[in-house]
């Protein structure tokens, strides 16, 4: 271990990046459906590496935590502010109540069992699986008027509490959402997901006016018109107009394209290129003629274009309205092939409610896409570069907000740079969704800031806490684990039944997604998606998850302010 100690002294950053690499490797190990995850793995590996006396500048931790929390706010901003509307009021109340009951449960254990501030914050971070609490609570602890030794002990206790409680904090929602609640309510998750999908698609598998099976694969096929075809002698435009759910892309005659937008009459042996849903192509196959292959070296260029919805016309309207709009404007040759919200794919069903800020993927020819995009939104590719002016302003504003101080029970408390950057991120994310020309932060960049920022932060926390962790584990390990089980399970049970019987969230998929989102439980949500077999839980999850991410992050300073017990100093 001499080489390790020498590296730690010469370049601590080598140890930090090694911690992240090994931590994410450890996080990939699976036990059944449970995966530890890269963040928890990084913390555990950091604790191990920290036993060798690695010293890393605390400023690194602060910078990367601020970047992480700003990215979280930026991604959740659009959905958070929309969750404040009356249309999603019951889901908003459910998520808020889940967070409040979680906080109350943590405080109850802290007061009943005399837990110190650091341990209580770690219990919340792990039991509620909200890693951001580590940062917001740690920042508040650093502002307390106590010795630096006590601050170090409390920060170590946060890391220990998180590590001990996180495993069941992740596993508990999986058990409750996919087994316990469905069992006692006698729900078949897969059947309920199919039923909800059928309701969202209009209750019928058949294509009707204004509805389309966008979940089907888009394909382009070539057909040779036969001499007996009803379209011989008629214009290509007449053929195109008659294809309600298909797009006529080209007409080929003797291997060359002819103008299919004009009045040129079709002839026998002409080849028509048609794009559409597979089911629709099969319906029209007999009327179009004999399917054939395109001429050698012929290229037909189509494009997948991603737009941010900015038009008020489509805000809170149904997905089918996009299809109606394109038909109404003679642009039926454009197909909706994807919708994403907060980075998650939504079910492509006719009654899916769209929001401004949603990302929608359209498929069609570049010319048709150019005609339709202006009335729907703004192309993402046009803003695929980070707007560093607004990014810098956002970070500056967040750090300024973090300096604001208030008092809880006489204790000076600030939400710190973490809480400030979260609020600033929410604001600038919302600004981006409503005015997409400004504050651009591409999805890839946002994901990197979020994931790498948290990984660096947690790695430094683990390395710094390493030397004291074993002592703390010996003193509180089993009790702390049991407290974590309580913090994980109690809020879920209380809020699930309250949501079902009082808030009237009766649809099984929506009720279970509320539990996952209100707990910010990504593993539980992933398990719910697997059981559902489709994307129907995503819509409810995004609303509740956005609310929970904000509230749970702000619980860190509250816990430090409301819990007044400090740990005993280490023996000299």
Image (tube, rainbow, N blue to C red):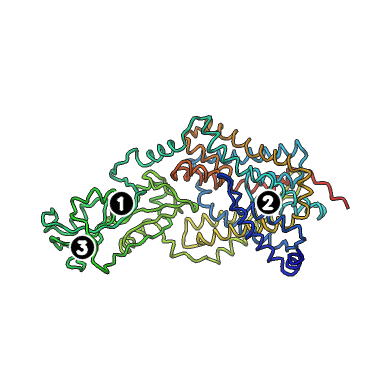
Q: Which mark is first along the chain, 1 or 3?
A: 3
Q: Residue at x 69, y 63 (%)?
A: 15
Marks 1 and 2, the one that precedes in the sequence: 2
State the residue position of label 1. 277
Mark 3 → mark 1, Cα distance in angstroms: 19 Å
Foreground residue among 516 and 174: 174
372 is higher (above) or lower (below) than 197: below
Residue under numbered circle 2: 134
Q: Point out residue 284 in the picture as x, y percentages from the top left corner.
A: 22, 50
Query: Is residue 132 in view?
Result: yes
Mark 3: give few (<14), some (14-19) or many (20+) Cα within 10 Å. Answer: many
- Mark drawn on residue 201: none
**Is residue 211 rendered to the left or right of residue 43?**
left
User: What quarter of the picture does the N terminus occupy?
Assistant: bottom right
User: Helix, strand, or loop for circle 3?
Assistant: strand
Real-space Cα distance between discs 2 and 3?
A: 63 Å
CB contact under 8 Å: marks 2 and 3: no
Q: Residue at x 80, y 46 (%)?
A: 566
36 vs 387, left or right, is right
Q: Which quarter of the picture shows residue 16?
A: bottom right
Q: Nearer the viewer, residue 391 or 37?
A: 37
Quick check: 300 left or right of 105?
left
Q: Residues within 10 Å of mark 2 (few under 14, many from 20)?
A: many
Residues at discs 3 and 1 in contact (Cβ within 8 Å)? no
Front: mark 1 or 2: 1
> Which residue carries the number 3 mark?
251
Q: Position of residue 152 (x, y in %)?
A: 78, 54
Q: Which SS class for mark 1?
A: strand
Tag 2, which secondary structure? helix
């Amino acid at each position: 271990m001499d080489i390790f100690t020498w590296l730690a002294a010469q370049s601590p950053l080598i140890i930090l990046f090694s911690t992240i690499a090994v931590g994410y490797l450890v996080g990939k190990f699976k036990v059944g459906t449970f995966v530890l995850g890269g963040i928890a793995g990084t913390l555990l590996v950091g604790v191990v590496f920290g036993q060798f006396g690695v010293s890393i500048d605390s400023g690194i931790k602060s910078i990367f935590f601020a970047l992480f929390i700003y990215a979280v706010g930026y991604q959740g901003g659009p959905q958070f502010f929309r969750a404040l509307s009356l249309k999603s009021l019951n889901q908003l109340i459910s998520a808020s109540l889940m967070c409040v009951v979680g906080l109350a449960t943590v405080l109850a254990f802290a007061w009943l069992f005399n837990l110190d501030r650091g341990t209580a914050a770690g219990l919340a971070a792990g039991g509620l699986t909200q890693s951001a609490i580590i940062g917001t609570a740690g920042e508040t602890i650093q502002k307390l008027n106590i010795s630096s030794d006590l601050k170090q002990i409390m920060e170590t206790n946060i890391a220990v509490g998180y590590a001990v409680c996180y495993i069941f904090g992740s596993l508990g929602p999986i058990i409750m959402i996919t087994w316990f609640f469905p069992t006692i309510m006698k729900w078949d998750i897969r059947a309920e997901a199919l039923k909800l999908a059928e309701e969202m698609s209009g209750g019928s598998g058949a294509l009707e006016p204004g509805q389309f099976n966008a979940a089907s694969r888009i394909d382009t096929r070539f057909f040779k018109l036969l001499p007996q075809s009803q379209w011989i002698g008629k214009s290509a435009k007449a053929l195109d107009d008659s294809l309600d759910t298909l797009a006529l892309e080209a007409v080929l005659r003797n291997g060359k394209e002819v103008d299919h937008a004009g009045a040129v009459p079709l002839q026998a042996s002409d080849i028509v290129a048609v794009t559409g849903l597979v089911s629709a192509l099969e319906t029209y196959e007999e009327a179009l003629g004999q399917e054939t292959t395109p001429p050698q070296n012929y290229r037909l260029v189509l494009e997948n274009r991603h737009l941010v919805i900015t038009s008020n016309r489509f805000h809170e309207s149904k997905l089918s309205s996009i299809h109606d709009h394109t038909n109404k404007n003679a642009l039926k040759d454009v197909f909706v092939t994807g919708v994403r919200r907060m980075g998650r794919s939504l079910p492509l069903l006719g009654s899916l409610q769209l929001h401004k800020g949603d990302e929608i993927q359209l498929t069609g020819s570049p010319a048709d896409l150019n005609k339709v995009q202006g009335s729907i939104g703004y192309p993402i590719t046009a803003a695929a570069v980070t707007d560093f002016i607004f990014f810098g302003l956002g970070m500056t504003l967040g750090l300024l907000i973090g300096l604001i101080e208030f008092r809880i029970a006489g204790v000076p408390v600030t939400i710190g740079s973490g809480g400030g950057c979260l609020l600033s991120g929410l604001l600038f994310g919302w600004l981006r969704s409503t005015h997409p020309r400004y504050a651009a932060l591409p999805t890839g960049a946002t994901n990197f800031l979020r994931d790498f920022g948290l990984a660096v932060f947690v790695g430094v926390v683990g390395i710094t806490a390493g030397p004291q962790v074993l002592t703390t584990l010996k003193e509180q390990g089993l009790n702390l684990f049991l407290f974590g089980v309580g913090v994980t399970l109690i809020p879920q049970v209380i809020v699930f039944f309250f949501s079902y019987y009082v808030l009237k969230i009766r649809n099984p998929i929506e009720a279970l997604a509320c539990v996952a989102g209100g707990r910010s439980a990504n593993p539980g949500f992933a398990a719910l998606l697997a059981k559902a077999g489709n994307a129907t839980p995503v819509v409810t999850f995004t609303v509740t998850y956005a609310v929970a991410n904000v509230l749970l992050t702000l619980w860190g300073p509250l816990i430090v302010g409301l819990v007044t017990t400090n740990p005993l100093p280490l023996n000299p």
